[in-house]
Amino acid sequence: MPTYPFLSDDWIAAARRIREAHRGSPQQVANPVRMNQVITDVPFGPGSLDAHIDTTSGELEIDAGHLDEPDVTVTLDYETAKAVFVDGTMETAMQAFMAGKVRVQGDLPKLIAAVQQQATPLTPEAGDIARRIKEITE
């Protein structure tokens, strides 16, 4: 299986294909969130990237660009984003937050609930999506 640098155009396209393969399957989003992300220190492109996650439809939507009226906006560096959003470890997220590597504007409890949910997927489909995303990531 090919791998791609996290958040590169090829990685985003592959992540979309993974998401599309699971469209309509039960993912049980217990803590829906509209989250904008500003990723800094990106090792390609202009050096930063705007992205978002939206789970309010009941399915995971990840894409470039920002949402209007997000619940929360998170600013973090590339390596921290990769550790949190690909590896999904709550400990990494909390350590990064405590170290000042993560800046949050908006609903912090909603962010914490979303990160916890990512670390412990509620369905086999959600776990498969997380596993496949990890597999395509350099």
Image (tube, rainbow, N blue to C red):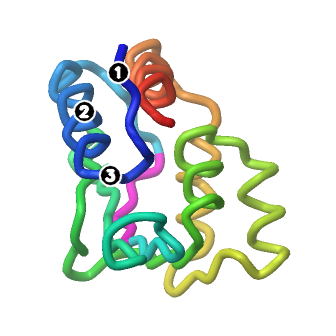
Q: List x then y, in percent, for residue 20.
A: 15, 28
User: Label 1 belongs to which residue?
Assistant: 2
Q: Which of marks 2 and 3 is nearer the N terminus?
A: 3
Separation of disc 2 and disc 1 at Cα? 9 Å
Instruction: State which tag comes first along the sequence, 1 or 3.
Output: 1
Residue drawn at x 26%, y 45% as measured from the top left: 12
**Which stretch is magenta?**
31-36
Percent coordinates x, y for residue 98 in the rendering: 83, 74
Q: Name the residue under label 3.
A: 8
Q: Are marks 2 and 1 in contact (CB under 8 Å)?
A: yes
Label 1, label 3: how far apart the Cα atoms are: 13 Å
In this rendering, position of residue 33 left or right of residue 119: left
Q: Are marks 2 and 3 in contact (CB under 8 Å)?
A: no
Q: In this view, does 119 lie to the left or right of 29?
A: right
Residue displayed at 18% across by 28% down:
17
Q: Is residue 124 above or below residue 72?
A: above
Q: Does dot 1 land on a helix, a strand or a loop?
A: loop
- Residue kind at label 3, given as amino acid type: Ser
Tell me the residue that label 2 is attached to: 14
Callout 2: helix, strand or loop? Answer: helix
